[in-house]
Image (cartoon, rainbow, N blue to C red):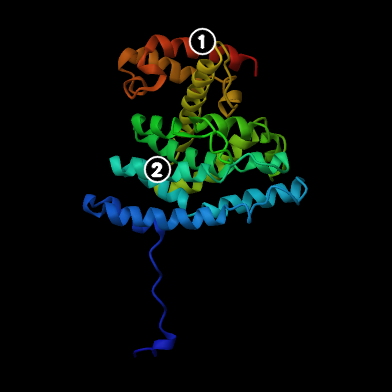
Amino acid sequence: MTLPKSAQAKPVPPSVADRAKKLLADPAKRIDLDALVNEVLGAALDALSQEKFPPTGDNPDKENFSKRIAAYEAAIADLLPLVILLARWGDEEGRLQLEKIIARAAETAPDGGGTVVWLRLRWYPVWMLIYAAGIAASAAQRHALLGAVLTLPVPEDASQASSPLKPVVLPASSRLFDVADGFKWLPGHEQQRVPLSEHLFAQLKPLFDEMLFLGAGYERHFDRFEVVTALVIADLNSREREGHIWAPPGRYVWKAERRSNPFTALHGEAEAAGAQWPPLAAGLFKGSLAHFQKVAEGFGKYLSRW
């Protein structure tokens, strides 16, 4: 028996991830891929506008902080699987699309005037996108792409036309570190030492389970990405201020007290591979093992203080 048209189920439109997979599988579809990225990015930028996230008004208390975090995550919900797929499967065109997404997202985080907590929190969706793209790139051993994501030049303050360009991880990490303790207001993070890092770990895990099927390897890839990113930030900071080693603390801080130490593991990996270590071959740490060792030595002392 044929059901009347009114009773027939409507076809479910393909998700952003499904559409992206089809386009990434066909290099001839790069114009269509660009159109998809523009469509999803445009919607996210509208959702991240100052009108939706005013820097004044609500008090920065537990309730309002939690609401903003949830709203930021909802605003980029379609972008996250897209950047994961671009980082894992994209070619040179995929790299350009990733850079566009992160650069445009950074434009939604001007300093301006207002409540400091809300101003600093504008970098949260940018940081989350960097994590999503970076973990995917790191898991796929795509270090050149990882380096491009971490060192993408963006204005330090998008509200100033003359603002100097900085690698995106510098303003994002320094601004968010100012409000990182606010993430202790979120359920389950009240007593944690690095609540921002722990929240990102928990929020991204289901998405990576679905998109890349990393399973138990997700934690290892997350930790490795965080340590590489922390070392890159420490390196960039030390170049700006000679001898100044700083990086945002992540889960690797408390793991440094354990036998399975992500920093020690990465350091040993670099020592064993020497000049052929893939991150060096990709241009990170000036492409120099000696320079990496200098940064790692300073970072190890910084880490011991935690």
The answer to whether residue 213 is visible is no
Q: Where in the figure is residue 259, as x and y percent of width and height?
A: 53, 19
Residue at 25% in and 54% down:
29
Q: Where in the figure is residue 108, as x and y percent of width and height?
A: 56, 46
The front one of 289 and 6 is 289
Q: Which residue occupies the extreme left position in the image?
A: 28
Q: Where in the figure is residue 245, as x and y percent of width and height?
A: 57, 16
Left or right: residue 89 compared with residue 138? left
Left or right: residue 106 compared with residue 145? right
Amino acid beneath label 2: Leu
Left or right: residue 22 compared with residue 147? left
Q: Give the label, 1 or 2, closer to the camera.
A: 2
Q: Where in the figure is residue 70, as x and y percent of width and height?
A: 62, 52
Which mark, by number, is residue 98? 2
The front one of 174 and 140 is 174
Q: Quadrant of the C terminus?
A: top right
* CA distance for labels 1 and 2: 32 Å
Residue at 65% in and 41% down:
112
Amino acid beneath label 1: Glu
Q: Secondary structure at mark 2?
A: helix
Residue ID for mark 1 = 297
The front one of 35 and 71 is 35
Q: Is residue 48 above or below residue 150?
A: below
Q: Quadrant of the N terminus?
A: bottom left
Q: Is residue 270 above or below residue 228?
A: above
Assess disc 2: are there few (<14), some (14-19) or many (≥20) residues with their C-alpha within 10 Å of its C-alpha.
many
Q: Which residue occupies the extreme front position in the image?
A: 162
Q: Secondary structure at mark 1?
A: helix
Which comes before the other along the chain, label 1 or label 2? 2
